[in-house]
Amino acid sequence: MASARSDIASSASTASPSAASPSFIAHKILIAGGFGSGKTTLVGAISEVRPLRTEETLTTASIGLDDLTGIDGKTTTTVALDFGRITLGTQIVLYLFGMPGQERFSFMWDELSYGALGAVILADVRRLDDCFPSVNYFETLRLPFVVAVNCFDDSPLYEPEEVRMALDLDADTPLVLCDARDVGSVKQVLITLVETIAGRRSAAASQARLAASAGRS
Amino acid sequence: MSPDDKWRHREAGPVVRPYAVTGGRTAPDGGDVLDLLAVIVATGQPASAEDAARLTPEHRKLLSLCRRQITLADLAADIALPLGVVRVLLADLTQLGAVTVVRQRPPDQRTGTDVLQEILNGLRAL
């Protein structure tokens, strides 16, 4: 913590006054899910969605998926990401980034998740296996996440417990039902996520305190 | 180029290849790769006449967008250019001293319990 503060202090002396301190603090939450799971709808329900284009190097993973016939020289492909921003109070801006959950986009997951607070995985019960790559990724990364089952009108009804078992979720990973079109529902999903993150933090902090006091005695 | 290439579909995207605006450069000159949420701001230092003459319209547009602090993601969306292209152009502007990256705490030190509580309060009040 102390080193971060000194970073800010030292930059103040070298940069112009406007660059001395950030006028807002940006935080990132990922909205992951398979194709058509409702990522853009969810981001759009609570913020203005904007497309972000990236030019990505084509990997062998996309061979057979992207039609390269006649364009053998093409080495990059355009991936469009959606993101939205929510201004909270005077200083905090929450950014929601849609994260394409298909395995073939995994090359960009690390960049997207860098510095993220946590993630929402949108699940479509008709295609639950689309969630597996994201669940595995966030579990490995130890990034807090919630699974939000997007209730499409024609979705078959499953008990949350059934979905939880099918995804083999850890006991402390929340699973909620949501309607990605509804701002109140989306709000509740985000609140659940931030509460989960806060819970993890305080659990980790009290564990650290226990370890420290055990070390002293 | 085959004759068919002349008839591009409207949805095929820009006719100019993305990295044409960077003079073919795909990696920023010097410096680190900027994070999506890196905050950039114009320094307000006037460029020399020689430097100003080298700026492309895209450079100028970026520079004007940076009059207020703005994230890389917002910049790329505002100017409608791919992220990689914007990174290259920003590196040019940084080297000229026209823009600078606002120092922030690393993301893992940005959110204490108090910040999380503030986010929660903000979300509940939406």
Image (cartoon, rainbow, N blue to C red):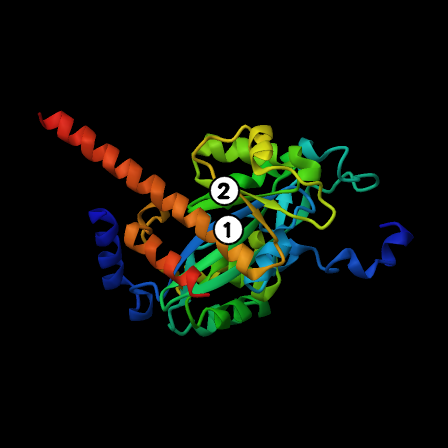
Q: With A158 as the anchor, is B41 left or right in this view? A: left
Q: Position of residue B90 (x, y in %)?
A: 49, 59
The residue carrying mark 1 is: A189
Do circles 1 and 2 both sit on a common chain?
A: yes
Amino acid on which the number 1 mark rests in the picture: Val
Q: Regarding mark 1 in the picture, which secondary structure is present there?
A: helix
> Which residue is disc 2 drawn over?
A146
Residue closest to the far left: A217
Quadrant of the image occupied by residue B94: bottom left
Instruction: Give the image location of residue A174, x and y in percent.
Output: 48, 40
Query: Disc 2 on helix, strand or loop?
Result: strand
Q: Name which of mark 1 and mark 2 comes first in the sequence.
A: 2
Q: Chain of mark 2?
A: A
Q: Residues within 10 Å of mark 1 (few under 14, many from 20)?
A: many
Instruction: Tell me the quadrant of the picture where the C terminus of chain A can be found.
Output: top left
Q: Which mark is residue A11?
A: none
Chain under callout 1: A
Point 77% across, 33% down: residue: A64
Q: Which amino acid is tagged 2?
A: Val
Viewer-closest of A88 and A170? A170
Residue at 69% x, 49% y: name it: A152
**Badge 1 vs badge 2, beta-carbon distance below 8 Å:** yes
From what the image shows, is residue A20 above or below residue A128?
Answer: below
Nearer the observer, A23 or B7: A23
Q: Is residue A64 left or right of residue A193?
A: right
- Is residue A112 toward the left or the right of residue A129 in the image? left
